[in-house]
Image (cartoon, rainbow, N blue to C red):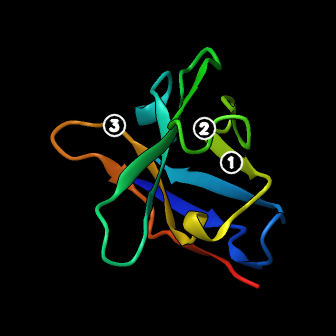
Amino acid sequence: QVQLVESGGGSVQPGGSLRLSCVASGNIFRINGRLMRWYRQAPGKERELVATITSGGTPTYADSVKGRFTISRDSAKNNVYLEMNSLNPEDTAVYYCNVPNLPTDYWGRGTQVTVSS
């Protein structure tokens, strides 16, 4: 089994920054070479994909975070990070780390990000 644990969330004012981390543990060899993703879910909304990074380090982003968020990974440890800048209230959500897997993806429990003045 693989466990994913997110950290780094918190409360910030608009325009602020946070850096989220996702640390993998357990049988991490199972996720070697896999995509790693960050999702978020705001109250009353569906979970949405925020950013993806390939095993080679190629990132993709949701339009809503392009230019503000940066995803990165430590492939040796299968850890993934999300640097978030210029945060606004619409970024308020629980942020989840994800690794695609069959039959069931691996998910962390999430870390809360709240952006308000």
Amino acid bearing label 3: Pro
Amino acid bearing label 2: Asn
* Mark 3 surroundings within 10 Å by alpha-carbon count, few (fewer than 14), some (14 through 19), many (20 or more): some
Q: Nearer the viewer, mark 2 or mark 1?
A: 1
Give the labeled residue for mark 1. 82
Amino acid bearing label 1: Leu
Quadrant of the rendered image containing residue 117: bottom right
Give the labeled residue for mark 2. 78
Distance (Cα) linking label 2 and label 1? 14 Å
Tell which circle, 2 or 3, labels the residue nearer the N-terminal end. 2
Q: Using the image, tell me which numbered label, if any, was put on residue 100.
A: 3
Q: Nearer the viewer, mark 2 or mark 3?
A: 3
Q: Residue placed at 59% from the left, 63% from the top?
A: 91
In the rendered structure, the answer to whether residue 2 lies left or right of residue 84 reads left
- Residue that lies at the very extreme toward the left in this rendered image: 103
Distance (Cα) linking label 1 and label 3? 18 Å
Tell which circle, 1 or 3, labels the residue nearer the N-terminal end. 1
Secondary structure type for disc 2: loop
Task: Tell which of 27 and 23 is nearer to you.
Answer: 23
